[in-house]
Amino acid sequence: MYTDRISDMIAHFIGLFETEVDEARMRTHYAGGQGLQDDRALPPHDDVQNADQTYDVPLQDYDPGVKYRAGHYEFSATRTHHALSFDDAIRKHSHHASYDFAGSHFRMPGEIDAYQEQPKLVLYTGPGSVIAHVSQLTLLQDDDYLNMTDGPNVARDTTYVTERTTEYYNEAARFTPFDSYHRTDTYDGLQSIAKDLHDYITQARDNDVSSLGTGADQDFVVASHSITGTYVNGVAATALPDVDDFMPDRGIAKPLTDREESDAPQESHTGAGNSLDVAAGANVVANIVSVVNTGVVAPVMAVMGDYHQIDAITQSYVYSDHDSIDSAFTREDHAGTVANNIAAFQRTVWGESADGGHAESTPDATIFPTAWRVSYIEGDVSFVHWIEQYHFVSDNDTMTVTTSGADVSVLTGGNSAVNLANFLGIGIQYDLVIVGGNVLDMNMIAQMAVLYDNDSVHALPGSTSGATVQSGNNLLWNEASIHNVGANDRFASMPDYMVEAAKAINERDPHMPEGLSTDPNFAGYAGLNVLYITGNLYDVTYVKQVSVLGDSDDVTQAASKVLANNENATVHIDTGSNAVVNIAQITDYDSFGGSTYVGGHLYSDAVLIQGGLIEHDATQPHQAALANEVIAFLHDDNPADDHIDAVFNSGHDLSWSQAHPVDVMQTAVA
């Protein structure tokens, strides 16, 4: 490789020679005249000679490269800088103008840099508020008129039903003192509601109030700091009833089901029957709500201000089922109207198994956090779910029916009005949540069910005897459940290191307070994920459900003008079998175990109010002179040679939160 080095030397020499030639060409010479100074002469040859001729200057091979050793300086706080625009560079220069860069970035070995720049705590953006206002309203009017004879059509005034249901609604409101609040998510509005509830519950708790003193059939009140258990109509129960076990049989109003597969033919070649099946009721009115809230949850929470938790359930029902049925009819053996107020207060601990033990393993007590990551929210944080559901259904049917020598089914009821609301809030889990202000944790459910089912069933002279009537078997169902996740004894006084942690975050101090590294709640954590809220935290869920059903039916059975059609006829009339249902469930995750430190005051309020009123109103509209007019129009006709089954179906009117009257079969005449 010696020749390569020689070639490299020659190349360098040629390059240097060409450079000298170019400089010589560019040099400017004076043409004439005299220079300002004489050219410096070279020293004499004798002066540059070295008297010592013993020195050794060996010829070595050319070894290209640069050998450099840095001085005794050390660089600290070095960073990777990205390319900046000119404006960004100017702003950065102005920002660092007051810093001593020499002391911060360069120091001699062993020298303490007292002027080194301290890094600030990096704050990340925390989750925002979640506010949901839901209002569902159903208005359904299905007042049908049916006349199966050729007699006169006489209208019936049913305005009295609306008046009665309005009165019942006002009576039911006495047991729901918290249903008049208007939806809000402001600080003042929520604080005002919390103060009203606190004052009401405190007064009831201090005075041992057990009823509202209304004299109603059901009047029950329990107020305490916390309520646990299930109550059915004011009586403690061990199990929660299932609404499916109490739903009435809707008869011909049942939804159609798929037929079972069969190899045998399904046709029937028997002769036509002679029956009449009338269903004027069988309505279902239901409000259903489910809210699962996990907005901000953590094993440990530190509240610098007050902590106020409120659980409130109010339930009431009012119904009237006073029927007027002629003695010519046979009443079916059926259950009477069932009305239930069911409330459940539950509290469980996160990680606790069914047998009461802890399903999770014990954390390693030798590991504690040494670092933290802080998310920051300036101001208040609100998780508000305000849900209101209303049903106003009118199904006052007026019918004159008769047998026709065929199988006839008449369905003027069978309406279904359903409001559904379901919310599942999945938030971010933190190891520690620090709230600089107050915490308001409030869950409220208000339910009202109203039913007016005063029916009239009459038989005109000559009509088929032995007809059966079903006029009751109604259901009113209010079911409310509040399930809190988090022990009720998790609260403790505020330790000093939590205050220091909040102060460090406000001052942007990157160093985590030493006290956090010794908190037993953080055993097994290598680092902490912290959320700091400078303002207040509101966790409010409000559910209001109102279901009002007016089902006052007037059915008159007339004799067929064909006498043969009256013989061996089977007649069944159902004016009841209505269901008015309100179901609400709130699941609130307050804590994932651990502790909740409170720097201010702790308030805990809970109340349950259940009321029920059974009216015995016998109001009926003025009966028109219909009987004589119908009889006068009945005459004999030749019977038809063939009979076919006739079906009149004005039911199955589904109203899914449509806020307009619906009347499918108004003044339908067959």
Image: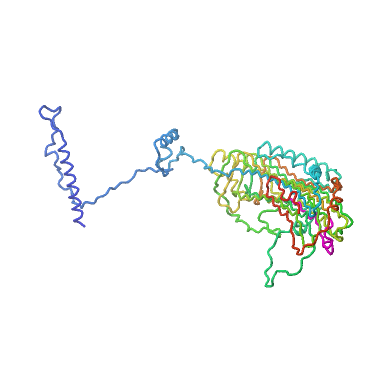
The image quarter in which residue 16 lies: top left
Q: Is residue 553 above or below residue 568?
A: above
Is residue 243 inside the magenta stretch? Answer: no
The image quarter in which residue 84 lies: top left
Residue 356 placement (x, y as % from top left): 71, 58
Left or right of 313 on screen, residue 495? left
Residue 481 placement (x, y as % from top left): 73, 51
Is residue 569 inside the magenta stretch? Answer: yes
Left or right of 654 on screen, residue 123? left
Left or right of 473 on screen, residue 439? left
Q: Which residues are magenta?
A: 558-583
**Residue 480 vs residue 200, the one in the foreground:** 480
Give the residue furthest to the front.
638
In this picture the colour scheme is rainbow
Left or right of 69 on screen, residue 616? right
Q: Quadrant of the N terminus?
A: bottom left
**Residue 347 vs residue 414, the one in the foreground:** 414
Give the residue furthest to the left.
32
Q: Quadrant of the C terminus?
A: bottom right
Residue 239 placement (x, y as % from top left): 77, 57
Residue 623 placement (x, y as % from top left): 86, 47
